[in-house]
Image (cartoon, rainbow, N blue to C red):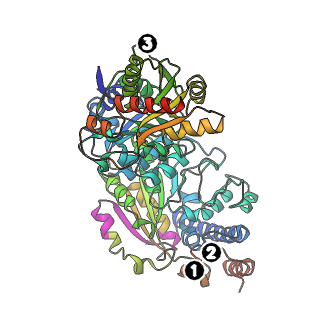
């Protein structure tokens, strides 16, 4: 089944919505963020602040400091893009705000770069107490939302506009800060996050057909990073590849590189991600163009393994 | 003179005395710290005295008391005058004031709620505190709580766009538990407000945004007390008090001089400032 994680998010929030602490905010994007589903069920705890994301984040902080669990929802580009309010009013105050950014990455498609957040994990990761969650499918998104209700401190939840294939089964249990080994392998590890996890799984399958054993890790929690899973993979596989629909600077690839260099990982590393601004096109076309799809990931893996020898 | 009138007169005199003491503590603190923002602390002193010693319901020994009124200083650089009031009210010992801006001090250069219980909001990036106060007021409404939210903004600060986002939101949601005070001290960091961005007609603007607006002479304690009392009686909309003040008020040679926005007095200047505040020729 394929589901947009923004849909899975809103459905989960409605299911949890009887918790009186939960307040949902959006800036004229109740449809795109799917939060209109919450509005239907809990109109008294839903606020559309208008097209005013700075104010939305500040109000969310004030609500959080008064015991509420506010979810401030918009396109990720617009909510994490109001960085000064996130850093002072949300993060510095240790406010229990859930910053929900839909429309992550070039997966947005036709709308083009201004609507695509390619820098959000980098900026959110730079804040000392900000958790960064980038779930890969409907089931892991539901788990993340359930978890976040009682998480202490600020958190950023990054969601897709486009549908993504399920990568987890019904037995999946969300564990904050734990990467999930979806597929085992020893030649190369594909460490992916968000919408690129499904592509990494497909890449691993096609590599398997060529006799290459590829491990796949789903890093749904980019911060705090599951360092042990990364180090284990780097020592048990000959090469490491990270995949993200995000800038190659400051996101998952950077986080993995930081851990490997600080803790003695020696496997060669390739970071797959965005090196330029996005553009209009279908999300499939864009994933192909920028090497984020299964074929692109597999090609990078072949290259790297050839270089390793 | 009836009892109520004489009680009122005593209250005004008491608050005037406290405001003078806060100004003195403020100058001592800034001189000791060697940096800070005297101008906007001195302009706010009278209102801060009225808030902490008349209007705010708070328990200094129980700073997180659930039913307390909240005060957010959105113009965060002026926090020393609030620290002075908190020390005087008993939130922490007066000796702590000497640690202002020092490494490890709970008295950060701009307020940090995580380091000093009783600070309701961490501010310092101008334009943000009002939204936080609005969020608190909204939470109070959701809970049907009796506590109120007070927020002070600066006249330079309201040049920030986020202020006007909050200005549109609060009346729309009928936040009559919110009272915002504009410390209109006429001067911002580098020049007079009117010479950078003329904000007039201020009262008409906030009225047009559907706030209850009251204009006062912000160093007249009787007017301050009246305006704060009036705000509590307003229903269905938030209150905006335009408090006309003088940046640097109380130290004649600091008044209305942008030079004293962000520079602490040296020891000799502090001695002269304190003498003037104490009324010693």
The answer, for residue A177, to whether it is visible in the render is no
Which chain does the residue under circle 2 lie in?
B
Residue A205, percent from left and from top:
39, 19
Residues at marks 2 and 1, common chain? yes
Above or below, B119 against A151 in this view is: below
| Magenta stretch bounds | B204-223
- How far separated are the C-alphas under marks 1 and 3? 66 Å
Q: Residue at x 73, y 55 (%)?
A: B93
Q: Position of residue B83 (x, y in %)?
A: 64, 59
- Label 2–label 1 contact, CB within 8 A: yes
Q: Residue furthest top?
A: A171
- The spot of residue A95 in percent (x, y) is 51, 42
Which residue is painted at 43% across and 12% down in the image?
Answer: A171
On-image quarter of the N terminus of chain A = top left
Q: Secondary structure at mark 3?
A: loop
Q: Secondary structure at mark 2?
A: loop
Distance between mark 2 and mark 3 Cα atoms: 62 Å
Q: Residues within 10 Å of mark 1 (few under 14, many from 20)?
A: some
Same subunit: marks 2 and 3: no
For disc 2, the neighbor class at 10 Å (few under 14, some 14 to 19, many from 20) is: some
Depth order, front residue of B39/A26 = A26
Q: Same chain, marks 1 and 3?
A: no
Mark 3 — on which chain does it sit?
A: A
- Residue at 42 percent of width and 18 percent of height: A208
Q: Is residue A43 above or below residue B30?
A: above
Q: Which residue is mark 2?
A: B263
- Badge 1 is on which residue? B259
Q: What residue sits right under mark 3 in the picture?
A: A171
Q: In the picture, residue B96 is in which quadrant?
A: bottom right
């Amino acid at each position: 089944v394929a589901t947009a994680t923004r849909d899975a998010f809103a459905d989960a929030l409605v299911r949890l919505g009887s918790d009186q602490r939960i307040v949902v905010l959006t800036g004229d994007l109740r449809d795109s963020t799917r939060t209109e589903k919450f509005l239907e069920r809990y109109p008294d705890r839903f606020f559309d602040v208008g097209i005013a994301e700075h104010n939305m984040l500040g109000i969310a902080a004030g609500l959080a400091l008064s015991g509420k669990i506010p979810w401030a929802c918009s396109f990720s580009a617009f909510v994490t893009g109001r960085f000064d309010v996130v850093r002072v009013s949300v993060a510095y105050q240790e406010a229990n705000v859930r910053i929900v950014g839909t429309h992550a990455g070039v997966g947005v498609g036709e709308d083009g770069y201004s609507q695509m957040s390619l820098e959000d994990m980098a900026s959110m990761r730079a804040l000392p107490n900000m958790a960064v969650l980038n779930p890969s499918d409907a089931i892991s998104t539901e788990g993340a939302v359930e978890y976040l209700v009682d998480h202490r401190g600020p958190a950023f939840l990054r969601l897709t506009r486009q549908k993504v294939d399920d990568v987890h089964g019904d037995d999946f249990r969300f564990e904050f800060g734990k990467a999930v080994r979806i597929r085992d392998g020893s030649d190369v590890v594909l460490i992916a996050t968000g919408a690129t996890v499904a592509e990494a799984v497909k890449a691993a399958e096609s590599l398997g057909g060529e006799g290459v054993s590829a491990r796949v890790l789903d890093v749904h929690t980019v911060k705090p990073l599951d360092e042990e899973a990364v180090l284990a993979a780097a020592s048990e596989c000959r090469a490491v590849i990270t995949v993200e629909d995000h800038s190659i600077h400051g996101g998952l690839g950077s986080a993995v590189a930081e851990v490997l260099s600080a803790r003695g990982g020696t496997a060669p590393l390739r970071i797959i991600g965005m090196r330029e601004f996005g553009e209009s096109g279908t999300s499939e076309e864009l994933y192909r163009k920028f090497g984020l799809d299964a074929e692109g990931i597999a090609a990078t893996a072949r290259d790297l393994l050839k270089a390793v020898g | 003179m009836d009892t109520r009138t004489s009680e009122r007169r005593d209250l005004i005199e008491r608050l005037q005395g406290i405001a003078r003491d806060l100004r003195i503590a403020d100058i001592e603190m800034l001189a000791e710290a060697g940096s800070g923002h005297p101008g906007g602390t001195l302009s706010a002193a009278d209102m801060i005295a009225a808030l902490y010693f008349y209007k705010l319901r708070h328990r200094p020994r129980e700073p997180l008391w659930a039913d307390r009124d909240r005060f957010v200083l959105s113009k965060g650089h002026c926090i020393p005058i609030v620290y002075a009031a908190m020390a005087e009210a008993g939130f922490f010992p007066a000796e702590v004031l000497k640690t202002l801006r020092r490494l490890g001090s709970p008295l950060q250069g701009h307020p940090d709620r995580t380091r000093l219980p009783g600070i309701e909001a961490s501010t310092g990036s101008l334009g943000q505190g009002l939204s936080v106060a609005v969020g608190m007021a909204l939470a109070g409404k959701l809970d049907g709580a009796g506590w109120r939210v007070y927020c002070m903004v600066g006249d330079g600060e309201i040049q920030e766009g986020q202020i006007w986002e909050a200005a549109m939101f609060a009346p729309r949601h009928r936040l009559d538990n919110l009272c915002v005070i504009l410390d209109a001290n006429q001067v911002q960091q580098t020049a007079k407000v009117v010479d950078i961005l003329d904000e007039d007609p201020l009262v008409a603007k906030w009225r047009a945004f559907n706030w209850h607006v009251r204009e006062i002479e912000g160093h007249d304690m009787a007017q301050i007390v009246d305006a704060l009392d009036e705000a509590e009686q307003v229903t269905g909309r938030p209150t905006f008090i335009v408090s006309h003040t003088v940046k640097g008020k109380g130290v004649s040679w600091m008044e209305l001089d942008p030079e004293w926005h962000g520079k602490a007095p040296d020891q000799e200047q502090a001695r002269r400032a304190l003498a003037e505040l104490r009324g010693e020729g």
